[in-house]
Amino acid sequence: MKVRYAVLFALVAAFMLASVAAAGPDAAKQRVSITTQFPKTTQVSPFVLTPLQAGAIKPDAGTWTNGSSNPGRDVMLSGQEVSINEGSSTLKGKLGNLVVRTRSEWVDAGNGYQVATDTWKIVRGTGQYAGVTGGGRGGSVWNARTDHWSSHVEGFLTAP
């Protein structure tokens, strides 16, 4: 009887090890940040991508180009007007290109400032970004008087 259980245990253990080996290693999520800042509102601005932990994605910098966007819509939430904008942008870095889809919810912060909470998701990539998936959240600010703009997002990327 003990031999039967030992053989059964060995078979189950072998099956489990084979299943884990066949699945391959899990791709690790890597936390990153992307920062943009422009002195004037423009369609093209610089960006810096910074890994916040070790992984396959390396630091990069280049230009952020605003692409297509749906016409924004205004909604009233708890008595405050919120402008919702959705669209895609292309980041052209030294190590590859990355297309991201963003959604921004803008509110009036007073004294000429507008602030937004952003969500973003990768659509596709080339170079070091080929096959990369992921996204995250962030924030943006725009000053109507100076036309200065700044954005900072963070999230997780998974390389293939």
Image (spheres, rainbow, N blue to C red):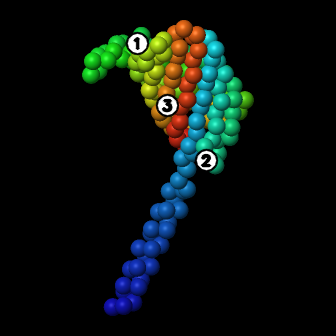
Three-letter amino acid code at disc 1?
Gly
Q: Quadrant of residue 40?
A: top right
Give coordinates of residue 13: x percent, y percent.
Answer: 45, 74
Three-letter amino acid code at disc 2?
Gln
Task: Report the residue marked by disc 3.
Answer: 138
Q: Quadrant of the N terminus?
A: bottom left
Give coordinates of residue 112: x percent, y percent.
Answer: 48, 12
Instruction: Tell me the SS state at disc 3.
Output: strand
Give coordinates of residue 105: x percent, y percent.
Answer: 41, 21
Task: Report the residue marked by disc 1.
Answer: 72
- Cα distance between the residues tagged 1 and 3: 19 Å
Q: Quadrant of residue 79?
A: top left
Give the mark toward the camera: 1 or 3.
3
Q: Quadrant of the C terminus?
A: top right
Answer few, some or many: residues within 10 Å of disc 3's Cα (few below 14, many 20 plus, some between 14 and 19). some
Q: Tell me if residue 2 comes above or below residue 72 in the rendering.
A: below
Task: Report the residue marked by disc 2.
Answer: 53
Of marks 1 and 3, which one's residue comes earlier in the chain?
1
Is residue 69 visible from the viewing direction of this image? Answer: no
User: Residue sitting at 53 percent across and 36 percent down?
Assistant: 154
Three-letter amino acid code at disc 3?
Gly
User: Residue sitting at 44 percent across and 79 percent down?
Assistant: 10
Instruction: Tell me the SS state at disc 2.
Output: loop
Answer few, some or many: residues within 10 Å of disc 1's Cα (few below 14, many 20 plus, some between 14 and 19). some
Of marks 3 and 2, which one's residue comes earlier in the chain?
2
Tell which of 90 and 41 is nearer to you. 41
Q: Is residue 73 left or right of residue 118?
A: left
Q: Is residue 73 left or right of residue 123?
A: left
User: Residue sitting at 64 percent across and 49 percent down?
Assistant: 54
Q: Is residue 141 left or right of residue 45?
A: left
Answer few, some or many: residues within 10 Å of disc 2's Cα (few below 14, many 20 plus, some between 14 and 19). few
- Cα distance between the residues tagged 1 and 2: 35 Å
